Image (spheres, rainbow, N blue to C red):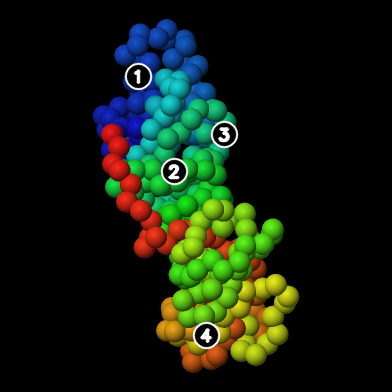
Amino acid sequence: VFQSYALFPHLDVFDNVAFGLRRKHVDRNEIDRRVGHMLELVDLTGFETRKPGNLSGGQQQRVALARALVNRPKLLLLDEPLGALDLKLRKQMQLELKRIQSDVGITFLYVTHDQEEAMVMSDRLAVMSAGRIEQVGPPDVVYDNPATEFVAGFLGASNLMTGEVVDRGAALARIRLDDGIHVQVTTERLGDRGPRVKVGVRPEKIKVLPAGEPVGDGWNSLEGVVGMTAYIGVSHQYTMEGPGGRKLSAYAQNLGAGPAPRQGDRVRLCWHPEHSFVIESSASREPKEESL
């Protein structure tokens, strides 16, 4: 585990990194070699004589990481290591840690409550709730095809709509939403769920068109009214009121190609069936026995 406060303030950078090796009575020449290699790895060559108080927050984190890695552990646990850093430095350190992990080839078990950080850092992601693992898999699979409602809501925003499976084809299945609108999902993603399910779609998968504009064949489509809008530079974010008063979110990349929808505009929300994910409706789930 490494944290910036784990450094010894009275020791310089070299001695902080060498601390564990000296406790193990490693040969002095070997210590010099391994510490030098670690400081080169974390890009701190030349900082050997500095004290932690003369380093930036990001440099302190790299020293603490070098001190942990120099002992050649098989597994390194990092518990919210970047939580105390400002946003810009935290994002920089995320990439630094990913590079270092790739270079040393040691498994990092990285604990964080920051969903974006978890997806940036991980090759394999586990989402936990109340001490239980809800889903494990590659970050893109967990994000695009969440297994539970908790995962769908925890990893970013989701639009969830309750409905009933009315048709299962070889490639596509049809679901009638509670307000009577039909949407399609891939049969593979539907699996053996049903009859009551929740259909979800991520906001960035939704294409926002003017009301009445024709939609491509096979697309899912809902009409709505633009409520709140937010401009965040790289995208426009909208909250829409759909059929039956349903609240839906949509993100549109800022391409600068024409005026963006405004509050009160009627629009059509469209997405491909393969961008839909399906989770079992909580009302249809039977209670499961607790296990130890």
> Is residue 166 positioned above or below 102 on the image?
below
Q: Earlier in the sequence, mark 4 or mark 1?
A: 1
Identify the residue under disc 1: 20
Where residue 195 appears, x then y in whole percent? 49, 63
Q: Nearer the viewer, residue 290 or 44?
A: 290
> In the rendered image, which quarter contains the N terminus?
top left
Alpha-carbon distance for marks 2 and 1? 31 Å
Identify the residue under disc 4: 224
Q: Amino acid at mark 2?
A: Ala
Identify the residue under disc 2: 126
**What secondary structure is found at the residue carrying circle 2?**
strand
Residue at figure coordinates x 70%, y 72% from the top left: 218
Q: Amino acid at mark 4?
A: Gly
Q: Is 260 left, or right, of 264 in this rendering?
A: right
Alpha-carbon distance for marks 3 and 2? 20 Å
Q: Amino acid at mark 1?
A: Gly
**What secondary structure is found at the residue carrying circle 3?**
helix
Alpha-carbon distance for marks 3 and 4? 46 Å
Residue at figure coordinates x 35%, y 26% from the top left: 16
Which class describes the residues within 10 Å of circle 2: few (<14), some (14-19), or many (20+)? some
**What secondary structure is found at the residue carrying circle 1?**
helix
Residue at figure coordinates x 44%, y 15% from the top left: 31
**Rendering quarter of residue 138:** top right
Where residue 33 appears, x then y in whole percent? 50, 16
> Is residue 277 positioned above or below 13 on the image?
below
Q: Earlier in the sequence, mark 1 or mark 3?
A: 1
Identify the residue under disc 3: 102
Q: Amino acid at mark 3?
A: Ser
Q: Nearer the viewer, residue 185 or 271?
A: 185
> Is residue 289 positioned above or below 172 on the image?
above
Alpha-carbon distance for marks 1 and 3? 23 Å
